Each structure stands twice: as structure tokens, then as C-alpha cells.
Amino acid sequence: MRVVSGIQPTGNLHLGNYLGAIRNWVRMQDELEDGQECFFFLADLHAISMPHDPAELKSGTLEMAAALVACGIDPARSTLFNQAQVPAHAELQWLLNGTARMGWLNRMTQFKDKSGKNREGASAALFTYPVLQAADVLLYQATHVPVGEDQKQHLELARDIAAKFNHDFAPHDADGNEAPVFTLPEPINPPQAARIMSLRDGSKKMSKSDVSEMSRIELVDDADTVMKKVKKAKTDPEPLPSELGGLADRPEALNLVTIYAALADTTPEGVLADFGGEGFGKFKPALGELMVETLKPISGRLNDLLDDREALDAILARGAARAREAAAPTLSAAYEALGLLRP
Ligand code: TYM
């Protein structure tokens, strides 16, 4: 088992990242057995696909590394690094660009969402972004990739690229059996890994790129800010139903119930069993308190880590050295399979 996943270091970690992805990273790390490994990285190379400020990218990368450690990623047990320190990611992306098809990339919904009405003005990096993401996981022979719902399409593409590359270029042994260059990775999205929506609009995912800060809870938010954001979260005047079916046309209410369930490690049905018939005047303060309780220890650790820049640099340097070592055999095999001469 090889677990690999990444996060873009733009903006602060929010509750959607935490409940949809990072908490599962920590759980997978904590359940590792001998011989199994986890690789978690800051996708700083992906971050340059959108307009960005270099100074903010640099500080954001360090802050995100600190946030992951504060959430429970242990650099002694998991390999934690940023892509830019491991050139094999960019190299393998170029090699895979020969295999990825334009038609496949044209179907990626994230490119459509992020380029919006300005497709012609979008960067080429935004278009080929999923090929870099494929390189990120294929480089380490990842078997399991914990991601939120929104990244599943990119993972499917990584599997398609791996399968086509193996089919077109993998060497064969003496008996004629294919010796695959890449492992096909499985996306992992456990049922308790909720898809968390914006607090202002239940049809949009909670996102660091949303202009409204009121739309998301950030892990660095203090207790007052959390309570304010929850109390101002968009809802409707109806009380909560006792059955999940009663939330079918109420996306904002469903989102708050989903968040509560994820924080309390129960199901939305379990939350409705407790709060069915109650109005938001009672539910929101309970939800806010649960959030504050969850975030308090994380933000405490985060602030301590941010005070020690040298320690953070050292964590990333150590992780990158291990990642470079782990990536080397697969990168060589890919060059070799393609017939590219190397020393
Ligand atoms: P990113 O940085 O947008 O998000 C990091 C992780 O958080 C999940 N996530 C959510 N889950 C539930 N609800 C939400 N509102 C929410 N918002 C974000 C994402 O699904 C993701 O798992 N392209 C990726 C980063 C990446 C990557 C990779 C991931 C680069 N290479 C290789 C896996 C494997 C991204 O932009 O995620």
C-alpha cells in the first residue's frame, strides 16, 4: 500500500479540505502497517496555473506545511514535501504529455470551472494541470489516493494515462508478459469524508478561491469568528426534519447537518435523530461549539509551528530528499520505456 495525496498551498486550510481530505490522510497514516508508506505534498507547481503572487506562494507553502503537521501529519512517519523540490514531478509530466489526449483534458470540469468565460486567456498550465496530477501519483506507484469528490475526475484521468502508457510502452518479459511501468491508483473517499459546501451557497463547494470569507471556516479562525460565520450561514426558516429525505431541497441545511456529522464522527441521520424538530437557533450554536472544539488544538499547534521557520524548512528538505529517492526508479523506467537516451 502506497498512499499519495496533495493540496494546493494557496490560501488557508479550510474545513472542506480538513473534513474532505486531510483528516483521512491522518487516519491513513495512523493505520499504516510495516512496509506501507504515505507521501503528502504541497502542490506548489499546480498553484502557478492561476495568476499568483510569488511572495504569497512562498509563505503559503510554509503555512500549509505547518497546517498539515498541526492537523496530525507526522513528518517522522509520512513523507511531507513540496513538489518544487522534487523535479521528477515536472519531468514525468512532460513524458506523460505524450500519452494524455486532448479529448480527455477537454472533458475536465475543473478546467471549465476555473477558466470560466476566459478560456482563451487561461494558462496552458491550467489545461495540462491534470497531467501533472497524474505524474504526482504515478511517480510513487501510488495504490491509494485520498481525495475529496471534486478530485475524482482527475484521478480517473491518471488511471487512463497509466493504462495507455503501460499498453503502448511497457516492456515485456521473456514470456511475453507486460511489465507495467505504472500502478493504477485508486481514489479513496471514505463515506465519512464529506463534501463540504459554501456557507453562503449550498450548491457551491467550500473553496479557498471564493471571494467571500464568510463562505468558509478556516482552521486559523478564532472562536468568535467561527461562531459569527456559523450564525450568519445561509439557512431557511424551517426546523430540521427527523429524516434525511426532508433535506432534499434544502442544500444549505443539508450542508450544516453534514458538517456536524463529520465533526461528531456520526452520520447525517444520527444528527437528525438528535436535532429533528429543532430550529437553527438551537442547531447553529451547537454546531459552532463543535467546530471551535475541533479547531482549537489545531490552531494552537499551528501557531507554535509558524514561529519556527528553520524547523519547517528542515521538515520539507528531509521529505523532499526521501521523495526524490522514491521517485527515481519510476522516472528512469518511464524514460527507458519511451526510448529516450540518458546517461
Ligand atoms: P485542493 O488543494 O483544491 O484540495 C485539497 C483536498 O481537499 C479536498 N477538498 C474538499 N473536500 C470536501 N469539500 C470541499 N469543499 C473541499 N475542497 C477541497 C480536495 O478534494 C482535495 O482532496 N489538484 C488538487 C491537489 C493535487 C492532488 C495531486 C491531489 C495535486 N496533485 C495528486 C491528489 C493527488 C487540488 O487542487 O486540491
Image (cartoon, rainbow, N blue to C red):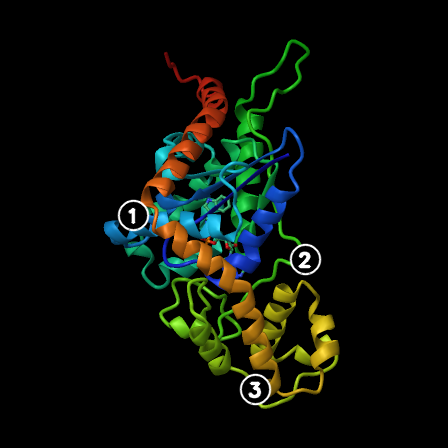
For the C terminus, the image quarter is top left
3 and 1 marks in contact (CB < 8 Å) = no
2 and 1 marks in contact (CB < 8 Å) = no
Give the quadrant of residue 209.
Answer: bottom left
Q: Earlier in the sequence, mark 3 or mark 2?
A: 2
Q: What residue would you read off at disc 1?
A: 58
Tag in front: 3 or 1: 1
Q: Earlier in the sequence, mark 2 or mark 1?
A: 1
The residue that appears at 59% across and 24% down in the rendered structure is: 180
Q: Quote the CA–CA distance across marks 3 and 1.
A: 41 Å
Residue 339 appears left or right of 51: right
Q: Earlier in the sequence, mark 3 or mark 1?
A: 1
Residue 169, image x, y percentages = 53, 23
Tell me the amino acid under the disc marked 3.
Asp
Estimate how packed mark 2 is, as few (under 14), some (14 to 19) or many (20 or more) residues with alpha carbons within 10 Å.
few
Tell me the amino acid under the disc marked 1.
Lys
**Residue 8 visible, this orientation:** no
Task: Judge whether 224 appears above or below 28 on screen.
Answer: below
Estimate how packed mark 1 is, as few (under 14), some (14 to 19) or many (20 or more) residues with alpha carbons within 10 Å.
few
The residue that appears at 63% across and 80% down in the rendered structure is: 249
Element under disc 3: loop
Q: What residue would you read off at disc 3?
A: 236
Q: Which mark is residue 212?
A: none
Q: What residue would you read off at disc 2?
A: 191
Residue 284, image x, y percentages = 57, 80
